Image (cartoon, rainbow, N blue to C red):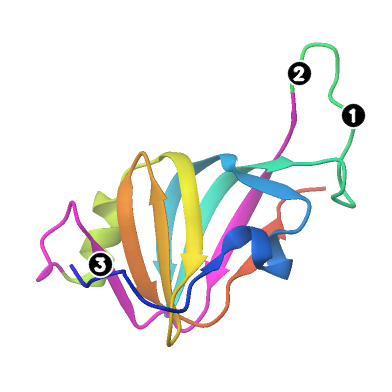
Amino acid sequence: MANTAFASKVDWREMREFAGTDLTRSFVLFWELESETLMVDIDLFLTPEHPFFEKPRPSEKACIRPAVIEFPSCDRIESEEIPADTDPATMITKLDHGAIEGLRRLVDGRYEIKGAFGVVMLEAERPILRLKGP
């Protein structure tokens, strides 16, 4: 696994794509690689600042919405839990789901996603966050 101690790091809280959300209260459902785009399906926690935030119903404790984080032009994917010589399409099927602890942009288009699923490193263009459904 590559050393992640780079001088330039940008936490997800500083990225405009994630404004009005809390990734540390979100959950990865599954990973998919399609046409060089890594797609991470998540249950996304919205804060009151998000334009699609709705007050939770009495039976709910938070505003959670289905969403996907897309990483276009994903050239490389690594995981500490999966051997480095595993081909990316196979690696994606082996990545687990779970709570997100953090996401940050390192240098040169590298991203690090940490969570219950371990540490996933990737090289891609800037992420795109999309809410799903109506």
CB of mark 2 within 8 Å of CB of mark 1? no
Which mark is drawn over residue 94? none
Q: Secondary structure at mark 3?
A: strand
Q: Nearer the viewer, residue 22 or 14?
A: 14
Q: What residue type is disc 2 on?
A: Glu
Q: Which residue is mark 3?
A: 78
Q: Is residue 35 visible?
A: no
Q: Residue at x 65, y 51 (%)?
A: 67
Q: What residue type is disc 1 on?
A: Lys
Label 3 environment density (alpha carbons within 10 Å; few <14, some 14–19, many ≥20): many
Label 1 environment density (alpha carbons within 10 Å; few <14, some 14–19, many ≥20): few
Q: Secondary structure at mark 2?
A: loop
Q: Which residue is mark 2?
A: 60
Q: Which residue is mark 1?
A: 55
Q: In this view, which residue lies farthest toward the top?
A: 59
Magenta range is: 62-86
Q: In this view, which residue lies farthest toward the bottom?
A: 108
Q: Where residue 79 sits in the image (x, y, percent)?
A: 24, 60
Q: Is residue 75 found inside the magenta-colored segment of the image?
A: yes
